[in-house]
Image (spheres, rainbow, N blue to C red):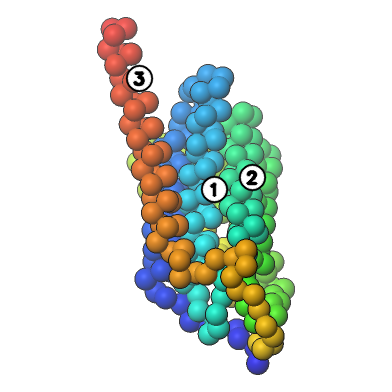
């Protein structure tokens, strides 16, 4: 029997969206300082923003969205593949941010950066799906799969455009929209999944972790990283304010 629909925990779905918005908002605050800083400090801001956007706004949202899905059978996640799926969006988000902060927000730069970033998001999503250990075979609806790839790239281009071109209140008001875009890609990819029960024996525990142990740690770590990012922004803003007062 093929399981196409499954059930979702609405609270975890909403939590995944909230974490995505928090990551996007914090990342938008942090990216302002990539260009304004020099040398190694600029790289530090780039790395930190990539970690918050890619790790919290994208990966944590994805993983919580995975946990929210109940296919009607026991599921655990391969630790090595799951860890790799975390690294990918952080790295590719960093490449996308580097493109626009280094070479400006031209159409070509936004497209190149968006393709890199979107490819990272899509790779993260489908490698994360491959980490599932479940007594079923997995395949994908090709139309929905392609749609999810298109959403990933389009959302990434829009995110980089906001980072590079949009300022003021509108910049931060974009965070909920970016959260919707990231969730849209994830849940389109989930809708593309087709599970067919096999009844085969599955090792759920060796080198894997069950989903019941993950929702709280993922949420706490993601929001803590966002809090650390906001702390960095507040500290840098205060430092610049004090420097300006001293120079006056």
Closer to the camera, 224 or 116?
Answer: 224
Name the residue furthest front: 206
Name the residue furthest top: 247
Residue 156 in percent (x, y) is at 58, 50
Residue 190 lies in quadrant:
bottom right
Residue 67 in percent (x, y) is at 49, 69
Query: Disc 3 on helix, strand or loop?
Result: helix
Q: Label 1 vs label 3: CA separation?
A: 27 Å
Q: Nearer the viewer, mark 1 or mark 3?
A: 1
Q: Is residue 209 visible?
A: yes
Q: Quadrant of the C terminus?
A: top left
Query: Disc 1 on helix, strand or loop?
Result: helix
Residue at horizontal 53%, vertical 85%? Answer: 72
Residue located beneath label 3 in the image? 240
User: In the figure, 192 relative to 131: above or below?
Assistant: below
Query: Disc 2 on helix, strand or loop?
Result: helix
Q: Is residue 146 left or right of residue 31?
A: right
- Total count of labels: 3
Residue located beneath label 2 in the image? 92
Q: Is residue 172 visible?
A: no
User: In the figure, 26 relative to 86: above or below?
Assistant: above
Q: Are marks 1 and 2 in contact (CB under 8 Å)?
A: yes
Residue located beneath label 1 in the image? 54
Q: Is residue 151 left or right of residue 16?
A: right
Residue at horizontal 64%, vertical 53%? Answer: 84
Q: Quadrant of the N terminus?
A: bottom right
Q: Label 1 vs label 2: CA separation?
A: 8 Å
Residue at horizontal 64%, vertical 45%? Answer: 92
User: In the figure, 185 relative to 118: above or below?
Assistant: below
């Amino acid at each position: 029997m093929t399981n196409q629909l499954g059930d979702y925990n609405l609270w975890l779905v909403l939590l995944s969206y909230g974490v995505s918005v928090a990551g996007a908002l914090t990342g938008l605050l942090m990216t302002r300082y990539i260009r304004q800083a020099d040398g190694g400090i600029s790289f530090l801001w780039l790395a930190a923003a990539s970690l918050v956007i890619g790790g919290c706004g994208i990966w944590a949202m994805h993983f919580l969205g995975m946990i929210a899905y109940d296919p009607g059978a026991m599921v655990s996640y391969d630790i090595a593949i799951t860890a790799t799926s975390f690294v990918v969006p952080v790295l590719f988000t960093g490449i996308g941010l580097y493109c626009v902060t280094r070479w400006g927000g031209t159409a070509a730069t936004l497209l190149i950066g968006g393709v890199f970033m979107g490819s990272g998001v899509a790779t993260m999503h489908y490698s994360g799906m491959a980490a599932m250990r479940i007594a079923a075979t997995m395949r994908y609806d090709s139309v929905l799969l392609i749609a999810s790839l298109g959403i990933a790239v389009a959302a990434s281009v829009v995110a980089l455009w906001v980072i590079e071109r949009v300022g003021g209140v509108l910049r931060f008001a974009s965070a909920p929209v970016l959260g919707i875009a990231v969730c849209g890609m994830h849940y389109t990819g989930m809708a593309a999944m087709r599970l067919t029960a096999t009844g085969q024996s599955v090792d759920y525990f060796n080198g894997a972790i069950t989903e019941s142990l993950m929702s709280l740690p993922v949420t706490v770590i993601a929001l803590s990283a966002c809090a650390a990012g906001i702390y960095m922004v507040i500290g840098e803003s205060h430092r610049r304010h004090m420097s300006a007062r001293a120079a006056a």
